[in-house]
Image (tube, helix red, strand yellow):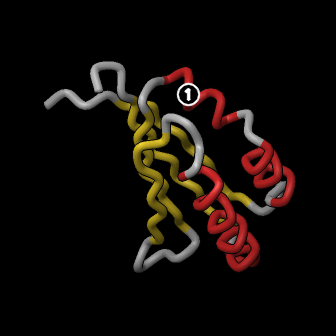
Amino acid sequence: MLNALTIVARIEAKREKLDLVKSEVLKLIEPTRQEKGCLQYDLHQDNEKPEIFIFVENWENKELWQIHMESNHLKSFVKNTDGALANLTINQMSKIR
């Protein structure tokens, strides 16, 4: 796990597009969990602001995560949610303790 990479992806849907975005983020879970190097891929939804979704991901290394970023299911997500997101932030993190 020396080179392990944690990703925290925050996806904020436009309110009027909440149902669309939720259906699209749900489609990412199973194919991503099958990818080489994926150790964890968990989706969370904010209890008070349901338009906010957080993926907590752990990957064996950055290279395998970058392959995920080019996957067909992720490209489909980007295409299908075009214009539906208010914000998207991806943080690449390393465990320090």
Query: Which residue is depicted at the point 71% across and 79% down?
Result: 19
Q: As rendered, which of 79 and 69 lies closer to the eye?
A: 69
On-image quarter of the N terminus: top left
Measuring from the top left, give residue 49's x and y in whole percent.
Answer: 48, 75
Vertical position of residue 39 compared to residue 96: above or below? below
Query: Which residue is depicted at the point 74% across and 39% down?
Result: 71
* Position of residue 25 in the picture relative to residue 8 (left or right): right
Measuring from the top left, give residue 6's x and y in whole percent.
Answer: 39, 36
Query: Which residue is depicted at the point 46% across and 36% down?
Result: 91
Query: Is the residue marked by circle 1 packed among few (<14), some (14-19), or many (20+) residues within 10 Å?
Result: some
User: Residue furthest toward the left?
Assistant: 97
Vertical position of residue 50 compared to residue 83: above or below? below
Where is mark 1, residue-wise?
64
Query: Which residue is depicted at the point 41% across and 49% down?
Result: 40
* Position of residue 89 in the picture relative to residue 13 (left or right): left
> In the structure shown, which secondary structural element does the residue marked by tag 1 occupy?
helix
Question: Tag 1: residue type?
Answer: Leu
Measuring from the top left, give residue 52's x and y in whole percent.
Answer: 53, 66
* Position of residue 29 in the picture relative to residue 73 (left or right): left
Measuring from the top left, give residue 89's x and y in whole percent.
Answer: 55, 43
Would you identify the image quadrant in which residue 69 lies? top right
On-image quarter of the C terminus: top left
- The number of discs equals 1
